[in-house]
Image (tube, grey):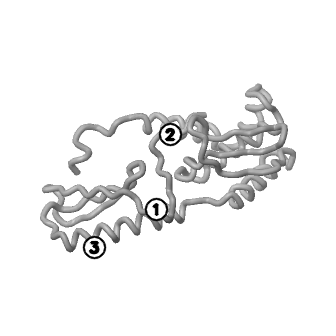
Amino acid sequence: MSAPAGTPDVTPDVPPAVEVRRSRRRRRTVSAYRDGDRIVVLIPATMSKRDEATWVADMVARIQRQERRKLRSDDDLATRAAKLNDLYFGGLAVPASVRWVTNQNARWGSCTPGDRTIRLSDRLQQVPAWVVDYVLVHELAHLLEAGHTPAFWGWVDRYPRAEKAKGYLEGYSAAARLEPPPGVEDD
């Protein structure tokens, strides 16, 4: 499973890079979004510098609040894995530990059956919970079947959103590798 490039490394103590884009087409609205490791704030070209400073601070704070709410802890992850184990594996796939890691750039998750440890890429912090659940189910299944055998996929396919989650991750990976279309920066 591949992970997307350019996913933000959200560290609460480090202020993010901020890019302000002024647009002549924008009249009244202000918006912001995360683009990799920076926050992009879109404002009208006619906005005063004082209003710009106020709006930028507000929009950066808003994005950071959203990101903090989305972050899941290792304890949350372990609790979720235990629930999924009970639901889809009848309690047979008991991991010794489940945690987020920052060093998985080419995988969504990994499992070491020998020591029963599961690690998920912190890049998954930004995807919907049902996608994280799929990756957990995938890694939990490795505790019962080490390889990607038909029996392994039989376990994974017990998760009702398995195919949808695979498609989501495939699309997410593909989108992360694409450059934005021409003209997007001008908004």
Looking at the image, tell me whether mark 2 or mark 3 is earlier in sequence order: 2
| Three-letter residue code for mark 3 | Thr
SS under mark 2: loop
The residue at 76%/55% (across/down) is 83
Looking at the image, tell me whether mark 2 or mark 1 is earlier in sequence order: 2
Q: Can residue 131 be spotted in the picture? A: no
Mark 1, other Cα within 10 Å: few <14 / some 14–19 / many ≥20: few
- Residue that numbered label 1 is attached to: 14
| Three-letter residue code for mark 1 | Val
The relative height of residue 108 versus residue 55 in the rendered view (above or below) is above
- Residue that numbered label 2 is attached to: 4
SS under mark 3: helix
Q: Is residue 128 left or right of residue 109?
A: left
Residue 162 image position (x, y, % from top left): 64, 40
Residue 167 image position (x, y, % from top left): 54, 36
Mark 3, other Cα within 10 Å: few <14 / some 14–19 / many ≥20: few
| Three-letter residue code for mark 2 | Pro
How many labels were placed on the picture? 3
The relative height of residue 40 versus residue 174 in the rendered view (above or below) is below
Quarter of the image that includes the N terminus: top right
The residue at 47%/51% (across/down) is 8
Looking at the image, tell me whether mark 1 or mark 3 is earlier in sequence order: 1
* Cα separation between marks 2 and 1: 22 Å
* The label number, if any, that marks residue 54 in the structure image: 3
SS under mark 1: loop
Q: Nearer the viewer, mark 1 or mark 3?
A: 1
* Cα separation between marks 2 and 3: 33 Å
Residue 54 image position (x, y, % from top left): 27, 73
The residue at 28%/70% (across/down) is 55
Q: Are marks 1 and 3 in contact (CB under 8 Å)?
A: no
Q: To which quarter of the image does residue 155 belong?
A: top right
